Image: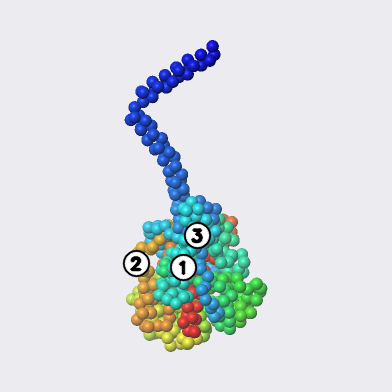
Amino acid sequence: MRKNSSLVESSEYNAIHSRILKRLSLVELCLAALAFFLVTVLFVSRFFYLNFETPVRSSNLPGSVEWLGSIKVASPPLPLPLPLPLPLPSSLENEGMNVSSPSIEIEYMNISSPSFENEDMNVSSESYESEELKEVRFLDEGGDGCDIFDGNWVWDETYPLYHSSDCPFMDGGFRCSENSRPNDQYTKWRWQPKHCNLPRFDAEKLLEKLRNKRVVFAGDSIARNQWESLLCLLSTAVSNKSSIYEVNRNPITKHSGFLIFKFDHFNCTVEYYRSPFLVLLGHPPPKSPPNVRYALKVDQMDRSANRWSQADLLILNSGRWWTYEKTLRTGSNFEEGKKMKMNMSVEAAYKRSMETVVDWVKNKVNKKKTLVYFRTYSPSHFRGGSWKNGGGCHLETLPELGPLSGSEHSYVKIVSDVLSKRASSLEMLNVTNMSMRRKDGHPSIYNNKGKNKSPTHIQDCSHWCLPGVPDSWNELLYAIFFKRQLIRT
């Protein structure tokens, strides 16, 4: 009985199934198959979309950099391919130079972070390394065809090259991290020329090359900034810091015009001479107008110049004090040929002073012994006013990334024109454009150890934090210096 019932149910099921199949047309079957296929394709493509569009996130990049999205990751500086023969003044000296960086269209660029694995973009670090290998190294043959002043700032986790807490040879006003600056992103940017790679700064090799020699910086307080940077860079190769000392035992924060630090083991001195104009600032000649308090003698070198002339490496700079506020407004007028030039403009006086400097190098400096460089103007980044009326830079945390727009700075052009017309052996260390982008690198409100960091206080947006931008100037100096040594040998 049960068997007969099963047969009846089976026959009924087959009949129903047959009726359903008859109702389905061929078109309906095709539509169902197509729908299944489309759902499958959309499901799979979702994973590819997530893989290529996920923004870059890495604990190795600062929070303010993560938002840049898909960033090309550059490899770290390449090793050298061949062995080498190897303070804040009381007035803050910001000089009222309210030079703001021009507006720049940000062009996303290579940000170097050797520990950053770019897995989200399916790009291996080896591919970027092979791209870097295509670039000539500055110290290689043909590297002199590269303009090392034309480039970009790239993120590099191997920086900084030292920490301020490890360098006792630095003014307190430049110790931004020790003065409670809350971020260190400004220390992580490396200068990368467009068409070549710079050698990595090697303090021990440079000290060996400078054994029994003198390095002299002469200029304003920004020259002092760069001088202290070089002291810190070189001191990384010396374990016994007490073997580095000021020869007259003067503290670095107070001096009477010059400081000379000796690296005892290498019998090498690194010296700074304060000379904001490079030419002589003195008393005006008799019968000068009563409003003339001082005379800037644009045709005479500073009295300390005789101490610079015997250096082996001489770095000069002047420009920040050549303003109306620092000259004519204070009663410092211009003198030439023992006559006051009451109608001479500041720019004309600066040009005449640069001609005096170039002629002095030509006639008084032994070019076979001394390498001479002129470091160009270092820009300020005051926003909302000058240094003395509320201008500041404390909110800046990133450099300007990408090419600069605008014309060449007038003082850089003056120096360039004078050097080209007088065929001088003095070379330019052109740091103006690269520094213009670093609005994030100034001490701002972090220029002292005081707890009050109010933005309303006078900010320093002219000098630079250390470690920081002046280290990159000295890296360029290092590269040029060794290139010269290779050419000489």
Q: Residues within 10 Å of mark 2 (few under 14, many from 20)?
A: few
Image coordinates of residue 254 in percent, x first then y, are 58, 72
Give the foreground label among 2 and 3: 3
Quadrant where the N terminus sits is top right
Q: Amino acid at mark 3?
A: Ser
Sequence-first disc among 1 and 3 = 3
User: Front-most of 116 and 100?
Assistant: 116
Mark 3 = which residue?
Answer: 125
Q: Residues within 10 Å of mark 1 (few under 14, many from 20)?
A: few
Q: How far is disc 1 from disc 2 in space, using C-alphas? A: 33 Å
Residue 21 placement: quadrant: top left
Residue 151 placement: quadrant: bottom left
Q: Residues within 10 Å of mark 3 (few under 14, many from 20)?
A: some
Numbered badge on residue 436: none
Res. 399 in view: no
- Above or below residue 13? Residue 62 is below
Sequence-first disc among 2 and 3 = 3
Q: Amino acid at mark 1?
A: Leu
Sequence-first disc among 1 and 2 = 1
Which residue is at 40% across, 58% downward?
107
User: Front-most of 418 and 427?
Assistant: 427
Image coordinates of residue 472 in percent, x first then y, are 49, 68
Taking the view exactly as shown, the residue that stands out farthest to the top is 1
Which residue is at 58% across, 70% downward?
232
Q: Secondary structure at mark 2?
A: loop
Q: How far is disc 2 from disc 3 in space, using C-alphas? A: 37 Å
Numbered badge on residue 133: 1
Give the foreground label among 1 and 2: 1
Image coordinates of residue 343 in percent, x first then y, are 33, 76
Which residue is at 37% across, 83% downward?
423
